[in-house]
Image (cartoon, rainbow, N blue to C red):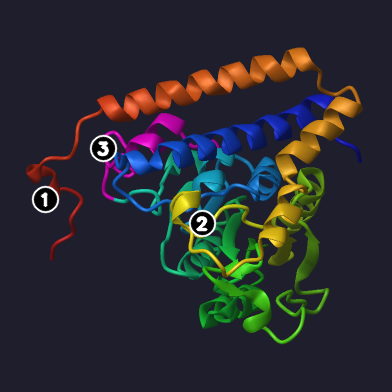
Amino acid sequence: MSLAAAARRGLWRTMLRIRRVQERIESEYLKDEMKTPVHLYIGQEAIATGVCAALRTDDAINSNHRSHGHYLAKGGDLPAMMAELFCRKTGCSKGYGGSMHLVDVAHGNMGTSAIVGGGIPIGTGQGLAFQMRKLDRVSVVFFGDGAADEGTFYESLNFALLKKLPVVYVMENNGWAVCSPTATRHCGDNVFHKGATDRLFSAKIDGNDPELVFATAQKAVERARRGEGPSFIECVTYRILGHAGCVTQDPKGYRDPAEIEAWRERCPVCAYQAKLLAEGVLDEQVLNATETMIAAEIDAAFDFARQSPLPTAADLHQNLFCE
């Protein structure tokens, strides 16, 4: 079933918004006002956008250190996210977490983990909780190809299969775990995991195609709602910028510049925008108005972050658990 024009424009706008936020963070990062490491999502926008478009507000997501795109696609508050990057009290984690620990429970973003693979068992446990409480909710876990090397992934997936949990595992295979290419960590093209079709829905797809990502995620989510168990989706993509920080901080030599340029030419935001323009779903007037609106929103979010108060010494005693 083809998507309506309004839905397609919605996917495009979400991707563009994520891209522009990431670009602004990258351009401002060396000012050293953001006192937290950042891991940018440029090049992977179609995945968070497509998956989250298939979810309801009360469905849960768990994410990793590269979480800005997931947070925004799931409806997270942009000013609160920027305040968190500036370590302010008004941040989505009250200034305690920084870029790698974003939370927005109201929109189903249950938290992100800086531990590689750390969100996988948590998201699996959320699926178990939904099942035990007989809630019509789905848990989605986003993780990278590096996290697929962790034993916790196999343990979690096995448990989800055993209990037929409503969990969708979304692996964003961007080809690199920090500076280690997939080929040095896996024998052949076997990061993709496929189980018995009656127990696990699995797919390996182009992660730069937002409509394909949406359609695949929708199938997995609907299956989970019917009580048919977990799914595994490998989205093949590429992180155009470095592992962490801004582009000038990325070590030189571990990636072939030609490889980066080849993937940059396959930019998911530019490709989808060009497609919608060619098909008449978008026009220059809508494009320009959207760019203006997003730019103003980003300006306001940065202003909010800069004007927000820093935590105080007294705040150290809040949100603690004692026996």
Q: Please, what is the three-letter code of the amino acid marked with disc 2?
A: Ser
- Position above or below: 26 against 158: above
| Residue bearing the label numbered 1 | 317
Q: Is residue 153 magenta?
A: no
Q: Which residue is pictured at 55% across the width and 43% down the height?
A: 58
Nearest to viewer (mark 2 / mark 3): 3
Q: Is residue 89 magenta?
A: yes
Q: Position of residue 107 (x, y in %)?
A: 50, 39
- Position above or below: 4 against 127: above
Q: Please, what is the three-letter code of the amino acid marked with disc 1?
A: His
When asked about the image quadrant of residue 312, the answer is top left
- What is the spatial separation of the Cα atoms under label 2 and label 3, in whole angstroms? 21 Å
Q: Is residue 271 visible?
A: yes
For residue 88, the mark is 3
Between 238 and 10, the residue placed more toward the observer is 238
Q: Which residue is pictured at 78% across the width and 16% down the height?
A: 284
| Residue bearing the label numbered 2 | 63
Label 3's element?
Answer: loop
Q: Which residue is pictured at 46% across the width and 58% down the height?
A: 65
In magenta, the rendered stretch is 75-96
Nearest to viewer (mark 1 / mark 2): 2
Q: Position of residue 149 (x, y in %)?
A: 57, 79
Quarter that holds the C terminus: bottom left
Q: Which residue is pictured at 57% across the width and 53% down the height?
A: 241
Q: Earlier in the sequence, mark 3 or mark 1?
A: 3
